[in-house]
Image (tube, helix red, strand yellow):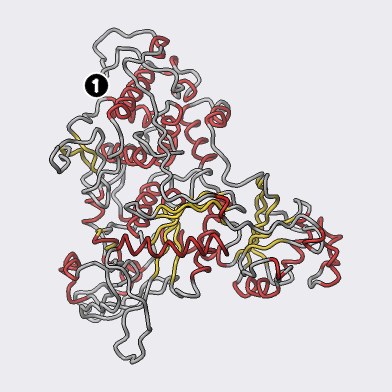
Amino acid sequence: MALFIRASTNKSLLLITNKYYNKLCVTSLKLNTLPVMTRANYSINNNYNSSRGIGTLSADYNQKNSETFLDEKEQDEENSPGPFDTLISKRRSQAQRSVLIQGESPRSYAELYLYCQSFGPINSIHQYTIPTEGDFFLVEYEDLSSFKSLIESSTHVNLNEVVPVQSQMLWFRDTLLRKNTQGPLGAFKKAETLPLAVEIRKYPNKLITNDYIKKLISSKETVSEQMEIIYKESKLQDIDLRLRFFIANQMELSLSGMFPNVTALPFGSTVNGSGKCDSDLDLVINLQTKPESKSSRLVFQTKAAASDAQVNAARLLEPISGLMRNYLPGIRNIEKILHARVPIVKFHHLYTNIECDLSVSNMTAVYMSELLYLYSEFNPKVSPLIYTVRQWASFVGLTNSKVPGPWISNFSLTLLVLFYLQQKEILPSIDYLKMNARLSDIRIADSSVNCTFLRDLTKWPVGKCADTSLEDLLHEFFSFYAEFDFTTQAVSLRKGASINKPTTQGPKKHTSPLHICNPLETSLNVSHNVSVNEITGFIIAAQKAAALMDEGNDYYPRGLLDIFVEKKKSLDKRFTLGKRNTTKPRVQVSKLFTLDQDNVNKHKNNNNNSNNSYNNNRDTVDVKRTSSKQSHGKRR
């Protein structure tokens, strides 16, 4: 059982495990392995400066008393990794055995494959192209020793002109040097017998536009089929996940010299089951330490950490951003945002075409991602519904992922979908998952956040509406929120029910137009930024979609193409906030799409927050390998 506790966590927090008080202890926790339950007795080794966000505690369980403890079979089940842990472990392992090699063209594949194979068996090669940068090959070896052999054989050129950093990113030199290299290059003539690349992509992180979606769904007849293909074609593909974990591993390796137990973990859309091909990468750096060893008389000399976790995170990200700017290949456009509630460093990864946000010790976000991932894995209809609702919101102009503002976010839309499915009893409430959690499910993260919930999907309650089609679920989603009382009610996934909207504390007490309780930190409102105009627009758009689907399939013969009305269209005055007026005579569907500026105000204030941003010209430029003189021959 792993119990993650941020430094400032008070010992009293562990009282949540009160009934297991005599069965807990602190042990060391390896980053790449699961914790093992070993001993009894409750103790806390407060060996590091707590609240600094750099420590990890784990609680273990004793099997000695057979009358009160699980039998061996149950113990194995208790220790078995959940689906999210399995996903993270698999992808991290792939990244640790992979190299990213830039070639001259797709024709480089055959010779590169033969050369790389000389260092050991290759598990897979993924090939892709970035128009502005060229062709790349992501090579995964079957074992770590083969990967290390390749890295040890790699070299630098023009040493007086470069920063000699060693990394997993390489480029393939011209065949003019073939006589000086190793490997069975004489077999190049037999290239036709080589296995093909696992995946060939024009470019990774492809942009999912509304025009692309229109073309995609026009080939399907039913709404359910259209929803399925939106999910299938928009979701992160294997190469997308591999590249994101590859970036995480690059950050991890760059810091491992000073922090040998560091991990860089993707969270958010990359791993929560709702990520798209063009999603950004959210990364968290976790500087984990071992508990104090009472038997050792040798203690590391260290610097004092700041008492405030936010200050400490900003202080840590400052030099990391400098390291990235000056030494890490492929990192560009670095922007520091260190005064936010969660300090981050934004950057662009040149060789994967992925935008990234880097934070420190934000484990609550990792566990939030795990919760959403479990929901999406529990029922195969969850993800297609989430993707479709988010695409609908994009079409009608409810979301803007480019800049922050008063509009509803994709994360809020995801929570609204999950809450609706809780009302349908398709998904359980978080309170249910917390109440039925096992010992191994206990997690306490950043600033005392309880992230405990049942992680074994086989023990989740069987959901209802198994025969309900995706089209019917979408229709009922629109109907549900077309009549939801957003004025007085808040959305609570923890309770699995609506609750009275809390009042904001302060001299001017008020309620937020949209209140969605953070599933793990319930005192927070994840949609506090949403304005009255935006939630009004959401309600009216839901009313419009619900009314159209009420009329029957004859009124939306093109399926989602008719439901996804462009943002320049709006609603008939028939629609009122809170309820759909079903008592009035039906109107012609064509009248529902006339412009009515009195009902919908769609002005977006595009305020681009540029605080603490750095001029892109200050970035250290990656060495370009374009001339034969500079590169000792062209790349292949």
Which quadrant of the view contains residue 61?
A: bottom left
Quadrant location of the C terminus in the rendered image: bottom right
The percent position of residue 135, horizontal first and vertical second, equals 70, 51
Residue plotted at (26% across, 40% down): 516
Q: In the image, 19: left or right of 301?
A: left
Which quadrant of the view contains residue 138?
A: bottom right
Q: Which residue is mark 1?
A: 579
User: Number of numbered discs present?
Assistant: 1
Reply above or below: 16 against 543. below
The percent position of residue 437, horizontal first and vertical second, equals 26, 59
The percent position of residue 99, horizontal first and vertical second, equals 63, 63
Residue plotted at (29% across, 7% down): 585
SS label for mark 1: loop
Answer whether residue 259 is visible to the viewer in this image: yes
Reply above or below: 378 against 600. below
Front residue (pair 63, 447):
447
Reply above or below: 541 against 60. above
User: How busy is the neighbourhood of tag 1: few (under 14 within 10 Å), some, or many (20 plus)?
Assistant: some
Under mark 1, the amino acid is Lys
